[in-house]
Image (cartoon, helix red, strand yellow):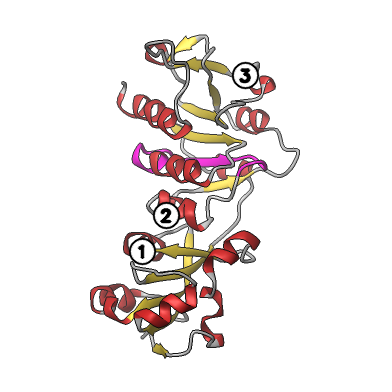
Amino acid sequence: MTVLQDIHDPFDPRIAAFTQVREKDLVGRDGIFIAEGEVVVRRLVGSAEVEPVSLLLARKRFEGMADLIAALPSGVETYLADQDVMDAIVGFPIHRGILATGRRRQVRKASQLLAGLPADATVLALSGIANHDNMGGLFRNAAAFGVDAVLADSDCCDPLYRKAIRVSVGAALAMPFARLARGEDLISVLTEAGFQPLALSPKGEVRLVDLRPARRRAVLMGAEGPGLPDTYLARSETVTIPMANGFDSLNVATTAGIVLHHLRFGG
């Protein structure tokens, strides 16, 4: 049974992980991440990919979260605080009144993750995605359209950054993902595991509506502006989304949503 601990002092050392949340976003948390809001925290508690470490609730939110608290694994520290104390702890008005810390259950190499996927599988492979809003949107789309796993190269931002988790509506906590080591080649990792690389580009040779993907396929998305490296495009089937009125590009998360929907439902 979870033991509830009352917090009256914002400097109480028991809740040090929750103090000055925005400042810690900038310096990192040594493998611990912050989940914010009811939907996200419920995804954290129910995930096979990550696990809760501690929970901090505004007292007014306790009744609505009682079922979740009762389901917490043993050892998860749970704290209650009045709203003004909680605001002082995190360093800004936290209107949702629900925060949790968590950590990944295991860190897998990209090759290990791909090897465990089924014969029919879709992977979202990301290169140089440095914007946390885009990262969150990409994970949200991946979850919505049944992607089996996400790969991120070493130039991508952290999907478990607080803002990315929030924008993903918790999908970043539920989606299997792996990060490539510095110097690892994304295309080689995919092709060695039997995945067809499908690289999105305004200059793609195949229109999305004409695409005939393999059973194991990886959708490659690059950063807005530079896009995917030429070395990736040269070794992939390049795919384009025709557009009207002279436009040739979309937000990266929007593009991913269109492509993943097409692969899932056939356009």
Which residue corresponds to the image point at 39% horizontal and 88% vertical from the top-left? 3
Query: Label 1 is placed on what type of residue?
Result: Gly
Instruction: Provide the secondary structure element on which disc 2 rests.
Output: helix
Residue, disc 3: 233
Q: Position of residue 165 (x, y in %)?
A: 45, 54
Instruction: List x then y, in percent, for residue 38.
Output: 32, 64
Q: Residues within 10 Å of mark 2 (few under 14, many from 20)?
A: many
Q: Is residue 153 magenta-colored?
A: yes
Q: Nearer the viewer, mark 2 or mark 3?
A: 2
Q: Residues within 10 Å of mark 3 (few under 14, many from 20)?
A: many
Q: Residue furthest left?
A: 63
Q: Considering the numbered disc 1 on the image, is that residue within a helix, a strand or a loop?
A: loop
Q: Residue at x 41, y 89 (%)?
A: 5
Residue 166 — which label? Answer: 2
Viewer can see residue 196: yes
What residue did someone put label 1 on? 37
Separation (CA) of disc 2 from disc 1: 8 Å
The type of residue carrying mark 2 is: Arg
Residue at figure coordinates x 61%, y 64% from the top left: 31
Dots 2 and 1: beta carbons under 8 Å? yes
Q: How far separated are the C-alphas under marks 2 and 3?
A: 31 Å
Mark seen at residue 240:
none
Looking at the rendering, the stretch of residues picked out in magenta corresponds to 142-156
Q: Earlier in the sequence, mark 2 or mark 1?
A: 1
Q: Is residue 115 visible?
A: no
Instruction: Measuring from the top left, give residue 20's x and y in whole percent.
Output: 54, 72
In the depicted structure, whether residue 174 falls above or below residue 82: above
What percent of the width, then of the height, locates residue 33? 53, 63
